[in-house]
Image: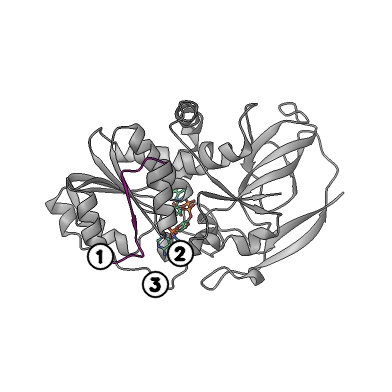
Amino acid sequence: MQYTAIKLVKRPALSITPDVFEVVTLETPELQDGQVLLKQTHMSLDPAMRGWMSDDRESYIPPVELGDIMRSSGVATVVASKHESFAEGDQVAGLIGWTEYAVSDGTGLNKIPPGVSPEAVLCVLALPGLTAYKGLMDIGKPQAGETLVVSGAAGSVGSMVGQLGKAEGMTVIGTAGSDEKCQWLTDDLGFDAAINYKSDDLAAQLKAATPDGVDIYFENTGGPVQDIVFHRMNAHGRIVVCGMIADYNTATPAPGPNWINIVKKRLAITGFTMPDHWNEVPEMMQKLGAYLAAGKLKYRAHKLDGLESAIEGINLLFTGGNIGKLMVKL
Ligand SMILES: NC(=O)c1ccc[n+]([C@@H]2O[C@H](COP(=O)([O-])OP(=O)(O)OC[C@H]3O[C@@H](n4cnc5c(N)ncnc54)[C@H](OP(=O)(O)O)[C@@H]3O)[C@@H](O)[C@H]2O)c1
């Protein structure tokens, strides 16, 4: 049987252009003992992919090699199995890649419990929810009554961070790139305030929204809000550095705030990446599942249609065109 896949064939200069990909037609091989054939149904698109396309050998994960199928996580149905742990019809999640079909030996594949939708997996139980949980709960250590600011708040990680903060009894302020996104945060997700970082007078808006200062800053973006939030931090505040998407397509990263406040306010600034914590995933998934079952985590899937829509669609992450978790429905 033939299927379509997309290979990375060039490294992007700055932004991701279609010529870095090649669409190929492949034949499914004969299954060997211990293998499964997967038909991917939902493929995740993530900002981290920009880093995986670069020839950066010092990052937390090696780059995708030129000529390889582009890396991504996704949800798939097992359509044939010669593996004792997987049966035809099982729904699984794992690193599947930009491809309609894949052969796997089961490494890194997790079975999805019946009744859980692929959207719920990719929006909550996979990378976005896990990242939000790890960063906020284990690194930020929220206390009821404290104030949390999260940037990229209408994105997949940010929207989970804010809702977890609310569930923990925090005052939560999000920053996002449009009034529509800000309205979604306050009206639907229960944020206490949301600030459009593309509007004027950001410092005054943030001051008004954080009369008691900021105890946790969950940093997803960098950009103009970073320095302003940094100056609103309270003593013993925690800054959780999850991502810096504002810098991913730039030649030179923006300079950071002056470090003197780290001393004066005894701040803890911690970077983290989820791949360091895969061993904690089963436990974190259970905790996220409990928030989900209690109705404390709403999610929104932004779905593109068909594998090849990923080629242009991935740039929605960098233009702010996505609301909620960006994914491709195959
Ligand atoms: N550390 C980890 O393990 C880990 C894991 C997952 C994700 N991350 C990081 O978390 C961040 C969010 O990822 P996500 O998957 O949840 O993506 P996302 O927030 O769903 O999508 C990206 C969003 O970033 C915003 N953005 C794009 N360019 C920007 C800029 N120049 N300045 C400010 N905001 C900008 C856009 O929203 P606006 O309309 O609001 O601009 C866009 O919708 C990324 O930095 C990602 O690399 C880290």
Q: Which amino acid does label 1 sit on?
A: Asp
Q: Give the range drawn in magenta.
A: 189-201
Q: Can residue 253 be seen in this snapshot?
A: yes
Q: Is residue 18 above or below residue 219?
A: below
- The spot of residue 181 in percent (x, y) is 43, 53
Say which residue appears at 48% left-offset and 38% top-offset.
Answer: 298
- Choose the circle earlier in sequence order: 2 or 1: 1
Closer to the camera in the image, 238 or 308: 308
SS assignment at label 1: loop
Q: Does the residue labelled 1 lie within 8 Å of ligand 1?
A: no
**Residue underneath mark 1:** 201
Q: Which amino acid does label 3 sit on?
A: Thr
SS assignment at label 3: loop
Residue 144 in the magenta stretch? The answer is: no
Label 1 close to label 3 by CB (< 8 Å): no
Q: Is mark 3 within 8 Å of ligand 1?
A: no
**Residue underneath mark 2:** 248
Q: In this view, does 306 lie above or below 291?
A: below
Q: Which amino acid does label 2 sit on?
A: Tyr
**Residue underneath mark 3:** 252
What separation in Å lies between label 2 and label 1 (alpha carbons)?
25 Å
